[in-house]
Amino acid sequence: MKIFFPLETLDGLNSVLDDRFGRAPFIMIYDTKDQKIVRSEANPFAAQDHGVGVSVANFIIQQACDAAVGNRFGPKAGDILKTAGIKMVDANRSGKETVKDVVHRF
Amino acid sequence: MIIVVASGKGGTGKTLLSTSLALSESNSLYADLDVEEPNGKIFIAPKIEQDQAFSVPIPAIDTDHCAFCGQCAEACVFNAIAIIPSVKSATVYGDLCHACGVCSHVCPVTSAIHITRKEIGRVRSGRRNDTIFIEGRLNVGIPSAVPLIAHVASEASRHSDTVILDSSPGTSCNMVESIRTSDYIILITEPTPFGLHDLELAVQVVKDMGKPCGIVINKSRQQDLIIEDFCQENSLPILLKIPYSLDIQRAYAGGIPLITARPEMKSILRNMLDKIKENR
């Protein structure tokens, strides 16, 4: 399963999840089957003027992710991910979690 | 000649001044470009002759013909389109769309994208004696006022005599669109730190757009060094000072034009307009 994470810090599996979705400073895609980080980089969409949610959702679909993790999903990102059948998983509900914390839940 | 009254800070007196400017000058046109909260009508008190809806062109994708190639989404600089090939979904987000038409242009399939109209506001027009009145009013919930402002300004510019535009407040997109077609900009401010701060921003916008401007100080205390010093440093003419006075405030709050409360202002405003036209 390929999972998308919006991140506050970039530190491998210890990366902290950001409360924002589209404008998180870093992003990561993790493959639970191969148990490895597929992508880990600065979020190219973070500074976009408009439609960040749309861009990130489109990206997640293009990258063939099965799930996306976040504290909240905006109306457009949420709408697109839902239509595409990509699972949305809540995180950071009671404090900041790391990628490691969330991956354990899958 | 098209003259716009703008400000940086809101509440400095754009409507106060612009409505009375229009009422002082015969055969002029007053256009309310503060489409998010138009209030000029209170002071002009026109008889309304037309009231029409205004709409913008928004593309819609017909999923029966769409190839789900994603080229439109790729081309859209506003990221307003989401294509999901796996579930044959193609959506245009109307509130992000700026109706530029690029999607339609790059689409490789005929009849996949067609244009629909989305109503975003209304335009009312009428007259009060020899003053023509136009107002744009944005519908609640619409994120971009710019197309409506552009439309009302365009309609106003068809008038052959003096046009007074009552700008949207602030210094971002709405104000830029409000001043874009004008020949001259009157920036009205108040002699306070907040007034000065936002005046500086407004002057920067005006300079970037290469338009001539003059300053009016409202709520003046006769000596308004905070603004006067700035104007002197930047070679900006002070066209007029409107006094900080309870009767003017009361009149405004009661929907009474400045030139009704202070009849001597009528010739003062006309002279100001004449000077602006002369120096063109």
Image (cartoon, rainbow, N blue to C red):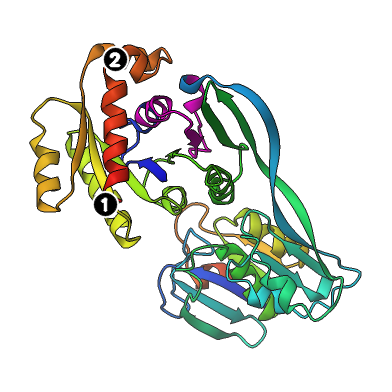
- Residue span colored magenta: B17-42
Is residue A22 visible in this depiction of the protein?
yes
Picture layout, residue B189 above or below residue A60: above
Q: Return the x and y of residue A97 as percentages of the image width and height.
A: 48, 63
**Crowd around label 1: few <14 · some 14–19 · many ≥20 (10 Å):** many
Snapshot quadrant of residue B4: top left
Parent chain of label 1: B
Residue at left offset 14%, top offset 52%: B235
Q: Return the x and y of residue B20 as percentages of the image width and height.
A: 38, 25
As rendered, which of A39 and B215 lies closer to the eye?
B215
Residue at left offset 61%, top offset 44%: B142
Q: Return the x and y of residue B264 as percentages of the image width and height.
A: 26, 17
Parent chain of label 2: B
Name the amino acid type tagged 1. Val
Q: Return the x and y of residue B137 as percentages of the image width and height.
A: 58, 35
Side of B207 relative to B174 (left or right) = left
> Tag 1 or tag 2, which sits nearer the N-term?
1
As rendered, which of A83 and B109 lies closer to the eye?
B109
Which mark is on residue A95? none
Q: Which element carries disc 2, helix, strand or loop?
A: loop
Side of A38 relative to B188 (left or right) = right
Task: Name the residue tied to disc 2.
Answer: B262
Is B20 colored magenta in this rendering?
Answer: yes
Task: Name the residue tied to disc 1.
Answer: B203
As rendered, which of B269 and B119 lies closer to the eye?
B269
Name the amino acid type tagged 2. Arg
